[in-house]
Image (cartoon, rainbow, N blue to C red):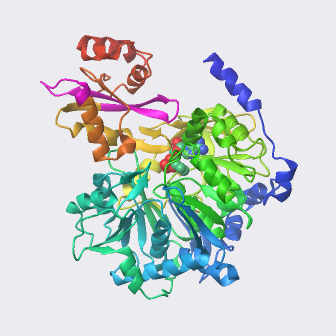
Amino acid sequence: MATDRIETLLDEQRRFTPSDAFKAQAHVRDTSPHERARRDPEGYWADWAKQLEWSRPWDRVLEWKPPHAKWFLGGKLNASVNCLDRHVRAGKSGRVALIWEGEPPGEVRRITYGELHADVNKFANVLKGLGVKRGDRVAIYLPMVPEVAVAMLACARIGAVHTVVFGGFSAESLRDRINDAGAKILVTADGGYRRGAIVPLKQNVDEALADTPSIEHVVVLRRTGQTVTFKTGRDLWWTELMARAPKDCPPEAMDAEDPLYILYTSGTTGKPKGILHTTGGYLTHVYATTKWVFDLKESDVFWCTADVGWVTGHSYVVYGPLALGVTEVMYEGAPDHPGKDRFWSICAKHGVTVFYTAPTAIRAFMKWGTELPARHDLSRLRLLGTVGEPINPEAWMWYQEHIGGKRCPIVDTWWQTETGGIMITPLPGVTATKPGSTTVPFPGIEAVLLDGEGKEVKVGGGYLAIPKPWPGMLRTIWGDDERYQQVYWSKWKNKYFPGDGAKRDEDGYFWILGRVDDVLNVAGHRIGTMEVESALVDHSAVAEAAVVGRAHDLKGQALAAFVTLKEGRQGTDALREELKNHVSKKIGALAKPDDILFSADLPKTRSGKIMRRLLKDIAEGRALGDTTTLADPAVVAKLRDQYESQET
Ligand code: PRX
């Protein structure tokens, strides 16, 4: 505890100010935007919105009827027009939008804004030809290939709502998301490459579609060329449809508040939440943050390493950078394939200038050693970013030295699927950074810390809260507005509750400490403990299960599952493997528990609540030396008694 405190004090004192050279070229060089936004937040956001193209101007910037906000009321625009047409019209059709690298080395495609525009028009016509209308939902289950951006923007063009499902999710997860969204069309591929192996996307689709009554057609992109089964009438090849599709598809004029997409994320119950984002406010927020946080100019090559299956990919691979008209890298595969220096070879080869990744990746790079980045010319890098989980100061320092060559500012950006865009972040030409701190809210965004009673904490620890609506905020949970109100707005009156704990230092800087609910962050991915528990009890041998997060060097947190078995079942190594694979099959490999601990009982309080703190202490080796003794009910009972007085 004492050393933690000393480290914290050191971190709070360690500061990095932007160099004069960086400052001189930065979009923002002083704090005047913060002041301007504080004085007149609506005027400030309206100024950003004016940088987009609208087919009808808005009548009113904001309507706030807590907990429902509407931005740019009456305004009409189209997201695909903002990401493509206006750049083409401005004479930038020859500018490269995507530099795509496939995982198999040597495969590179450079796609210009003009080419992307043409493909999006054609694919929008494909969707129309399949009967997709404004407001219909289209599910997308694709690898990281340019076609994923084409499919998303084509939906946006015709006013269809996309729901992208990460390719690492299982057939069952895909099925549940399709059914919840009521998707009419599914866009997928024969497979995708991951660490040299093939992810059988189409096979998962066939399994999922056994029980998805809303799906009428499946569009299949040929990526790996492997043989797949095809259901006549339902399944259609991407290339064949594109070859027949008309070239021009006039964009729909969408209302600012029309849905743009639904993206599922884990919550505290077993059922993922369909986060709904709308068009005008979302696009304004991601455009503004892409421009100022990443300080992007025409000369930059931006690379956000996130998969499009997550919100970071939606906001900072597709909508933000393309709305801004920049050139960006998109990479299909794993960071360690074929070598552990793949990212650095990509940065060097394509002259990446701004690089955005997750702490879990940085920790892996640290483990792999400094020699790998040192082999490549990373001198064009000028700004680094991180997102998804708290970054430990040691990883921050390593990133700054070995990737950024001590010259690149680091933007540690806090935000969530629900917030749509970055919320708390340095502005790289302005904010002095401290390793491990996300610093201060983006201009136009407010954030506070509240204690258990809802009173503001100026310096110290508390719950993070967002007291004012912001343009990119989620509008509701798809099909469940009551859950929206309950999850995010019932803790305090009219303040958004993100579910994170944080502390604030004397300078007003935020230090995000992590989730305070039953949501875990494993390698930057959000996983609900309940989802994993439900998957475990679905197995015929399991009577009860409790999942907790334990500290993990690389992933930040790892999943430890405590399992009680049904009468007559033995806790063997083989069963342990079987249970891990069962979770992988139910949810996806990302939710596979790292540890399965067989326990005679799950320790519970008198009111029946599982004592998660005790389980965490056991998983992290603090409460019990030898975890095999959990099989003895007396051991569990003793531990429970020891902890009971401390549990709330
Ligand atoms: O706990 C916070 C953590 O990730 C959560 C949001 O996860 P998700 O919706 O999947 O979005 C991830 C990418 C935006 C948050 O509630 N988180 C995100 N960024 C940071 C972070 N924790 C600490 N520092 C960050 N920069």
Q: Residue at horizontal 61%, vertical 37%?
A: 391
Give above or below for 47 relative to 549: below
Which quadrant holds the C terminus?
top left
Residue 585 on image: x %, y %: 28, 46
Q: Position of residue 577 (x, y in %)?
A: 28, 33
User: What residue sits 69% from the left and 82% below the top?
Assistant: 91
* Rendered-image quadrant of the N terminus: top right
Q: Is residue 356 visible?
A: yes
Res 400 → quadrant: top right
Q: In the rendered structure, does residue 563 fall within the stretch colored magenta?
A: yes
**Res. 133 in view:** no
* Rendered image quadrant of residue 223: bottom left
Q: Residue furthest left?
A: 568
Where does the image place residue 301, in percent across and percent down from the top left?
68, 61
Q: Residue at x 79, y 45 (%)?
A: 407
Q: Is residue 302 magenta?
A: no
- Is residue 255 rendered to the left or right of residue 461? left
The percent position of residue 322, horizontal first and vertical second, equals 60, 68
Query: Residue 76 appears in which quarter of the rendering?
Result: bottom right
Ligand 1 quarter of the rendering: top right
Q: Is residue 293 left or right of residue 235?
A: right
Q: Which residues are magenta?
A: 546-574
Q: Residue at x 81, y 46 (%)?
A: 18
**Residue 174 left/right relative to 313:** left
Q: Nearer the viewer, residue 572 or 296?
A: 572
